[in-house]
Amino acid sequence: MRKLLLNEFVLGLELKIIEDDLLLIGMPDPTQQKKKEDKADKYIPMRSSDGKYFIPGSSLKGVLRSRAEYIANIIHQGNGVCHIFDQRKKSEAHLPGRLCCGDRFEIRLKDAEKNQKTLPYATFYADACPACQLFGHSSFQGRLSVTDFPALDSDSGKPFSQTHIAVDRLTAGAAQSKLFTPKYLRDAVFKGSIHIQNFSIWQLGWLGFVLQDLREGLIRLGRKQTSGYGKLAIQKETVRFRYLGKPPTEEKLWGIGKYLNDEWIKQYGYGNGLAYESIDLPGAQWSTPDHLWYEYSAEAPPEPLPLWENARSAAYHYLQSFKFTPDMQLKSLQELWDRQREAAR
């Protein structure tokens, strides 16, 4: 479905480093050489070619995924999603208990190739865990993407140098001659957007859970998080929805399943009510600026938009009821893995 766009959600955010806090998402300073005995790099904030500091979209997406997985596992008592770091090892006979979806599909793909078969593309979405459906895995791009978040202007953000000590692993005290001074940012505002193409209502609700944790200061970015750095606040929030063709009901928001035929609903796993999931959107007025897409936009500074709360129940139900299909469960995969290891000997 990557080649077909039927609906789209765009969340515009302005993220501000909270007062008296610091942020460092960067890389080693190329202007300073690192000595062989110095294990601590001299880090500087990331800066674009036009001189603006920015938060890489990949960094923010990773933090959002980590928090989303944490929330899913709370809802489903540790079984809400796969674990992306639980990967198969050729030297080990038994697969990890929460094997990542990417490795699950690779085992299935190898078995399909052996039998001269292929896996339909829709399978890489339908059979994946909720996190991999939204954020992607090694065989599927995912529905959610995050742009870079540049500072609002080149003057936004004040570099601040702070000296730290390095800890001696043997004595647990300060290491001799190992001071390092990274540069942090403070008083900066960053602007970017989060996109979900062909979205479902439960995906919006799940993102709403994550944004609530961000508002409450439970999510941090960058280095030295354990020291209390990296806290951001949502300064401004805007949403935009687009549908190809007129929405079925102007004051309701529908998921992608509403716009699929029966064959696609089956292929992409939109059964069990997902084809008809919707939430109320009171007062929504849709426009057609290009006479093709119907659009609705809303802005909420600084309170969160009501749609997040309206979509949470859909997210809670989907995450709580998630279960891998038989072909993705460990018992079936372990049998394939044993045969593949035996054939490789």
Image (cartoon, grey):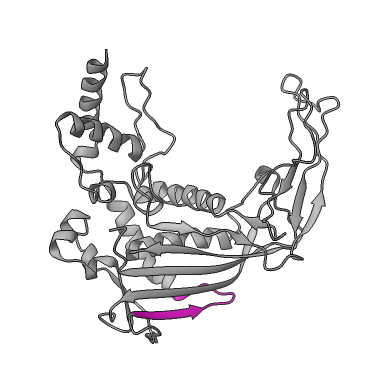
How many badges with numbers are in the image?
0
> Which sits in the foreground, 333 or 148?
148
Quarter-of-image position of residue 84 = top left
Image x and y of residue 309, in percent: 42, 69
In the visual, does 103 lie left or right of 70? left
Residue at 37 percent across and 53 percent down: it is 142
Which residue extends farthest front? 49
Left or right: 322 in relation to 326: right
- The vertical placement of 45 against 205, above or below, is above
> Of all residues shown, which one is farthest toward the right?
177
Q: Nearer the viewer, residue 10 or 1?
A: 1
**Residue 235 appears in which quarter of the rendering?**
bottom right
Residue nearest the observer in this picture, 133 or 278: 133
Counting from the top left corner in percent of width and height, residue 233 is at 63, 63
The image position of residue 227, as x and y in percent, is: 70, 44
Relative height, residue 175 to residue 129 (above, below): above
Q: Indicate yes or no whether the magenta region holds residue 298.
A: yes
Q: Is residue 203 left or right of residue 192?
A: left
Looking at the figure, which quarter contains the C terminus? top left
In this image, 326 relative to 164: left or right?
A: left
Please name the residue shown 68% across and 56% down the image: 49
Q: Which of 50 and 43 lies nearest the eye of the viewer?
A: 50
Figure quadrant of the N terminus:
bottom left
Q: Is residue 232 magenta?
A: no
Say which residue appears at 53% left-offset and 58% top-offset: 213
x and y percentages locating residue 173 in the rendered image: 79, 26
First to last magenta residue range: 293-306
Q: From this viewpoint, which residue is outermost toward the top?
A: 345
Vertical relation: 318 (above or below) 328 = below
What residue lies at 20% left-to-right and 25% top-to-bottom? Answer: 335
